[in-house]
Image: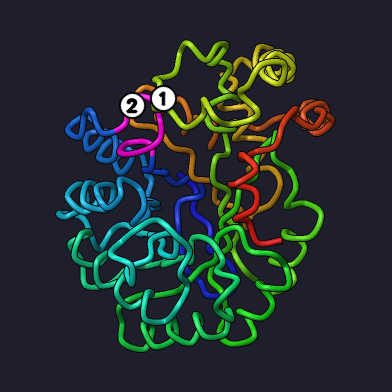
Amino acid sequence: MKTIKLGSTGLEVSRLGLGCMGMSAFYTGSGQDDAGAIKTIHRAFDLGVTFYDTAEMYGPYTNEELLGQAVADRRDQVVLASKFGNIDHSKGGVRGLNGSPANLRVAVEGSLKRLGTDYIDLYYQHRMDPGIPIEETVGEFVKLIEEGKIRGYGLSEAAPATIRRAHAVHPVTALQTEYSLWSRDPEAEILPTTRELGIGFVPYSPLGRGFLTGAIRSLDQLDVSDFRRQNPRFAGENLEANIRLVERVDAVAAAAEASAAQVALAWLLAQGDDIAPIPGTKRISYLEDNLGADQLVLTEAQLADLGSLPTPAGERYTAEGMAGLNK
């Protein structure tokens, strides 16, 4: 597995990481096979994956515990990333935005305990809190770096202006936001900003929440608790329109003698050497297929064909979810 350095801070990671969220939360089958999930994490390590992503809200809390258990005997060989800010510890741990220094302090102590480590390589603010100036949050990140509790900090779903304000206080290691063949908004302003400032870019949901694999054709395939049932892109006429989009990915995959997932990830990797996607899966077979993208080189014609795909039908979150994004 090739490695890259995330931005100017020099944090070295495998250029394909592993998003661990779906092992414990939000997706069909989440939280039902921890032993299998740990085997998948171990297999990822064997195949050269060093970059593992979680968050306190995944579960909540259980995903950090799972990942900590899985990497306990190889902690110094992996890069752990977690996130805070979507759980308000001042109100007993309810879901809600809180980017205050006090909430960050409580959150990181909890993450350290659950991950079973005395430091976290990369700690993100999961969503921006409009009630707390980003400079105050970053000030606490700096204290945590000085104390050795985190090695670097990141932002998730932050707007360019917010990124610049944070970076002016202390260099941002990485920005995490949704980016894939069907979520290309970062190309307009966010990617140019991170590249100008020397900040790494970590795309989450690089397979369009599983849709770009071509495996999802009906909501009947998803558990009633699966959050994608409420996602606008998986609903009604939007679903049918987006299936036609994926059929074009399938056509490129057939020509490239690869899977649709590999093609979608290879396209993303071709967008720059500062990008480290974190496709998520809890199954070894899907993991092995995804990692095949590391060796797949698409032709210029194939990249152009994929790059010309239309914008998907529907927003990437519900109205409530979109309102929580920093714009």
Answer above or below: position of 53 versus 144.
above
Q: Secondary structure at mark 2?
A: loop
| Residue 305 appears left or right of 17 | right
Residue 247 visible in the displayed image: no
Tell me the residue that label 2 is attached to.
Answer: 283
Q: Which residues are magenta?
A: 22-30
Q: What residue is rendered at 49% in x and 60% in y?
A: 126
Residue 26 belongs to magenta span? yes
141 left or right, relative to 236: left
Give the CA separation, mark 1 to mark 2.
5 Å
The image position of residue 260, as x and y in percent, is 60, 21
Neighbours of disc 2 within 10 Å: few (<14), some (14-19), many (20+): some
Can you say which quadrant of the picture contains the N terminus?
top left
Would you call the spot at circle 1 few (<14 residues within 10 Å), some (14-19), or many (20 or more)? Answer: some
Measured from the top left, where is residue 48 in percent x and y? 37, 44
| Residue at which label 1 appears | 286
The amino acid sitting under disc 1 is Tyr
Percent coordinates x, y for residue 78 in the rendering: 31, 57
